[in-house]
Image (tube, rainbow, N blue to C red):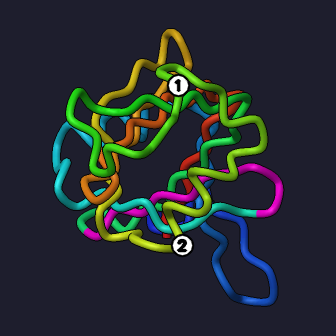
Amino acid sequence: MQPAASRGRRSVKGASMAQVYRSGAFLQQCWSVHPLCVAVKRMADDRTLILSCSSCRSVHHLALESVTVRTSMVPADPQDAEKPGGTDGDGGRLTKCLQTHAAALSLRDMDVFKDQALIRCAECRRHYALAVAAFETHQK
């Protein structure tokens, strides 16, 4: 019988692997308990948005189906001719926003029953409504 500390983890050459949970409920719980600790980190090549929590040390992966861009009522740049509710086909606007001002991005809302999340950028005042194909949480 395995000791309690090693149950549920597989090891490869003595190193323990992180647990992977394939449910949005883990991100929702993490975000509801410590919302200020969840940060948007990067966009992976396969249209997966990576978020991390500094409190519970979890890394959340959101495989994106689509991204819809919405501007706030008062745009940061009045010359911005963006249409409300425009689709960000390949996630290019979100990726560009993430590269230019990552610290301004935050998770604002999510619904695991509808597989949706909302990311807000405080710098450019855009909301990114995400349709999520799959959630994964990796615990260290």
Residue 140: percent from the left, percent from the top?
Answer: 49, 70
Q: State whether the magenta stretch is mostly helix, strand or loop.
A: strand
- Boundaries of the magenta span: 45-54
Give the CA distance from mark 2 to mark 1. Answer: 22 Å
- What residue do we see at 61% from left, 37% from top? 135
Residue denoted by label 2: 99
Give, as a three-letter code, the residue at label 1: Lys
Residue denoted by label 1: 83
Q: Is residue 140 left or right of residue 55?
A: right
Q: Is residue 52 left or right of residue 125?
A: right
User: Badge 1: few (under 14), some or many (20 or more) residues near its Cα, within 10 Å?
Assistant: few
Q: Between 84 and 9, which is closer to the camera in this rendering?
A: 84
Furthest-top residue in view? 113
Residue 39: percent from the left, percent from the top?
Answer: 35, 61
Q: Earlier in the sequence, mark 2 or mark 1?
A: 1
Determine if the magenta segment contains residue 120: no
Q: Is residue 36 above or below residue 125?
A: below
Give, as a three-letter code, the residue at label 2: Gln
Q: Say how many tags the image has.
A: 2
Quarter of the rendering occupied by the N terminus: bottom right
